[in-house]
Amino acid sequence: MILVNEPVIGLNETRYVLDCLQTGWVSSAGAYIEKFEQQWASYCGMRYGIAVSNGTAALQIAVGCLQLEQGDEVIMPSFTIISCIQAITYYGLKPVLVDCEPDTWCMDVTQIEAKITKRTRAIMPVHMYGHPVDMDPLIELANRHGLKIIEDAAEVHGGEYKGRKCGGMGDISCFSFFANKIITTGEGGMLLTNNDAYADRARKLRNLCFEPGRRFVHRELGFNYRLTNMQAAIGLAQVEKIEQLVQRKIEIGQYYLNKLKDLPGIQLPVEREWAKNVYWMFGIILDESTGENAESFAK
């Protein structure tokens, strides 16, 4: 059996978690949380990191930071996890779908402008399976129409677009650190932003919207989406070896490409000239038109 992914857990992960246990900082406060947030934000080229309980929570808080009105529209790809849609519909917003490119599986940015209406407020690009979305035309379009960008980078740790780290190009970006991701905290996620107000609001929303000074007086509802210090300790150790983990993913992807390149009846992952594909998932499309070859491969 070939596993989808095995977490690479080393000595520092064990040492940092043991430090949490020995010092008693096992819940949602502690030095490792801030260190993890700072180092991941810095790696991606953003100012602020806000660690949360999972990638779905990151998306939900990211949409909440925009404070949109019910009925407002968010443009997103037709091919992605349900978490993206749920983050939009939770607030009474309308998801507007665009199709995806057949080779990168990322949203086709040429379809976005035709979907923009007077109620459009944001675009949610999703970098799929380790390959980046074509961000420059999307950013230009968003700037021209006054739209915000929520960048879903859950599957593209270490990936790059024209030399820029994925997760470092949106108004807000979101990551997942689930067990099958390139770096993991078991469960966990993070928002990144350069915007002071978004960072403050994200911290508030993840922590039940407690008010400073009068903690249990709530002016609005938030969520218990906190990450634990123990999870952050694992995440910090993972970030310390991110380049090693990314390079290994790329090596595995290249191995599959070389071994399968001459096999008829399949479409393999691509890497655009402006992209650094980290091959988080190696997706293969079978070409039914080849008949027996595709059927044989599927078996």
Image: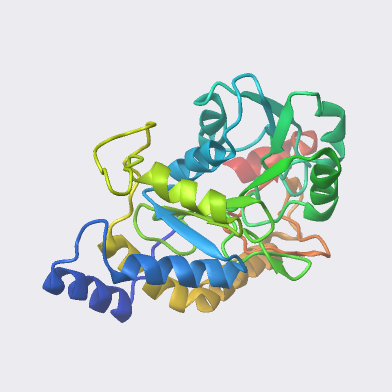
Task: Look at 49% across and 38% down and name the residue there.
Answer: 60
Is 143 displayed left or right of 213 in the figure? Answer: right
**Scheme of colours in the image:** rainbow
Task: Look at 45% across and 78% down and name the residue there.
Answer: 240
- Using the rendered view, name the quadrant where residue 228 is placed: bottom left
In this rendering, the count of numbered labels is 0
Rendered position, 298 above or below 162: above
Which image quadrant: the N terminus?
bottom left
Any part of residue 97 in sight: yes
Q: Which residue sits furthest front?
A: 213
Task: Look at 27% across and 35% down and name the residue there.
Answer: 217
Task: Look at 32% across and 70% down and name the residue there.
Answer: 32
Q: Nearer the viewer, residue 29 or 195?
A: 195
Q: Position of residue 30 (x, y in %)?
A: 26, 66
Any part of residue 174 in sight: no
Rendered position, 193 above or below 164: above
Q: Position of residue 273 (x, y in %)?
A: 83, 65
Q: Nearer the viewer, residue 67 or 89?
A: 67
Q: Position of residue 287 (x, y in %)?
A: 75, 39
Which image quadrant: the C terminus?
top right
Is 164 displayed left or right of 228 in the figure? Answer: right
Q: Nearer the viewer, residue 250 or 148?
A: 148
- Using the rendered view, name the quadrant where residue 111 is placed: top right
